[in-house]
Image: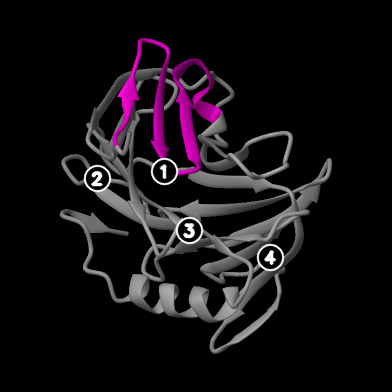
Amino acid sequence: MNHWQLTDASAKYTNGPWQVSFHRSEASQGLLVARDCVNTQQPLQLFAPVFPNTDRAITLTQCVSCGSTLEVTRAADTADPVETTLTWKMFAGDGEDLGIDLVISVRTELLQTPVDVQMQTRLPADEVLARDGSQWAPAVDSSAGCTLFRLTGEPLSYLEMIHPDDARGTMIGGQGGSTAVTHSLFGSPLEKGVILRARLRGMLLPREHDTVRAAAAYADFAEAAPPLGRTD
């Protein structure tokens, strides 16, 4: 099943050993990813939306799919007049690698509207590296757009990238046996009629030679053409 299957409550995607799920009532968890041979008790939590300026629940007005693409929309309201759409597209890498492209789109009907959207990934990791220029080093809070997690107790790594044109700052921290990376998006106010987009990519790949493969993947992603519309 290399396409999303929708029900009223959730969406599920399976590709080889990978199972990916999204639950409409728990949209703040993002995508939950598990693999048959991974011993981690909890699924990996990837690309979870965070809205720091509001404490209300994330209510979705739309959840649609087409093949390997899943799109959900959080409507604007009086508390937060920005409509936010998340579009995930799954893709296969080499062997049993799993890739996820994410485009976040925001729009409003008001003038000069502040936008405060973050994306957060949380997972257990023995080691977290960030690429700074041509070198890998232990990850710290920085503007680095390329972060590599070596998963705890598994021969797997997870690579997360934000496009260099869209990065507004990255925070990395640990809590409760897991490590979180949080990307801030959209650094300028939003104008009526303008759609801003930001791009991220995640890849699950074997631990062996992971830094070499991750560097090549980031170079390809950084050169990728922008989506339709304006990036911030």
Residue behind mark 1: 115
The answer for how far apart the CA atoms under marks 3 and 2 are is: 33 Å
Ranked by sequence position, the earlier of labels 3 and 1 is 1
- The x and y percentages for residue 229 are 17, 53
Whether 184 is among the magenta residues is no
Check residue 203 in the rendering and tell me which mark sits there, or answer none: 3
Range shown magenta: 3-28
Give the class, few, some or many, for how many residues have Cα within 10 Å of label 4's Cα (few <14, many ≥20).
Answer: few
Per the image, label 4 sits on a secondary structure element best described as: loop
- The x and y percentages for residue 18 are 49, 42
The answer for how far apart the CA atoms under marks 1 and 2 are is: 10 Å
The answer for how far apart the CA atoms under marks 3 and 4 are is: 21 Å
Q: Is residue 210 left or right of residue 67?
A: right
Whether 27 is among the magenta residues is yes
Residue behind mark 2: 191
User: To which quarter of the image does residue 43 belong?
Assistant: top right
Per the image, label 2 sits on a secondary structure element best described as: loop
Ranked by sequence position, the earlier of labels 3 and 4 is 4
Type of amino acid at the residue the image marks with label 4:
Asp
Ranked by sequence position, the earlier of labels 1 and 2 is 1
Visual colour scheme:
one colour
Give the class, few, some or many, for how many residues have Cα within 10 Å of label 2's Cα (few <14, many ≥20).
Answer: some
Check residue 141 in the rendering and tell me which mark sits there, or answer none: 4
Residue at (29, 35) in percent of width and height: 3
- The x and y percentages for residue 71 are 29, 33
Q: Residue furthest bottom?
A: 134
Point out the frontmost of discs 3 and 2: 3
Q: Is residue 213 left or right of residue 136?
A: left
